[in-house]
Amino acid sequence: MDDKFTPDAGPERSHPFLEELTAAGVPTHMHDWLRGHGIGRLAAKMGIVFQEMSAERMVATMPVEGNQQVAGILHGGAHLVLAETLGSFAAGIHAGPDRQAVGIEIGATHHRSASAGLVTGTAVAIHLGRTLATHEVVMTDEEGKRLSTARITNLIRDVRQPNG
C-alpha cells in the first residue's frame, strides 16, 4: 500500500511535505515533527511563512493579497487563521512528541485594517502548563502598526494510540 501517511513508505515518501515545509520557512530540525501532515492545507493556502518557532514565541508572515474580503482589506477570519496557526503550533511544540495540542478557545479584537503587503503575527506564551497552553497573538502591518490582538488556548492531551 502506498500512502503519504505511513512513515518510511519508501525514499520518495520519507518527507512527503518537504517542499511545503521548506517554502513555509520551517527549520529542518522540525521537519520530522511535521513530516506526516505538513503545516496544514489552510495555512499553506493562506501563504503563511514562519520566521521563528518555539513554544514561547512563534512568528510568521502572511500576505494580504489573496486573503482579502470583498471590501479589499484583510479578512477578519484570515487574522484568526494566522493566530490559530501560530498558537497551535507553539502549543504543539510545548506538548512534545507524545502529546497533542487541541484548540479550545480563540478570540480576537481587530484594531485597524490592511489592504496590501505582509502581515506579521507574533504569538507569545501567556501560560504553558501541563494541560493548557495560552498564547497572545499580535498581528502587525509592515510599518509595525497593530492590526489585531488574539488570544488562543489549547488543551494538551495524550496522543491516542490506535487499537490493536
Image: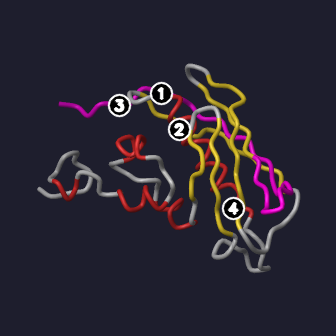
Where's residue 52, x and y in %? 59, 45
Tag shown at residue 157:
1
Label 4: how many residues lie within 10 Å, few (<14), some (14-19) or many (20+)?
Answer: few
Tag shown at residue 77:
4
Q: Is residue 163 magenta?
A: yes
Please, what is the three-letter code of the amino acid marked with disc 4?
Gly
Please, what is the three-letter code of the amino acid marked with disc 3?
Arg
Q: Is residue 76 magenta?
A: no
Where's residue 22, x and y in %? 43, 57
Does residue 54 sit above or below 8 in this rendering?
above
Mark 4 and mark 2: Cα distance apart in space: 19 Å
Mark 1 and mark 4: Cα distance apart in space: 27 Å
**Residue sitting at x 42%, y 26%:** 158
Mark 1 and mark 3: Cα distance apart in space: 9 Å
Please, what is the three-letter code of the amino acid marked with disc 1?
Arg
Label 3: how many residues lie within 10 Å, few (<14), some (14-19) or many (20+)?
Answer: few
Q: In the image, 134: left or right of 114? A: left
Q: Which of the 4 image quarters holds residue 1?
A: bottom left
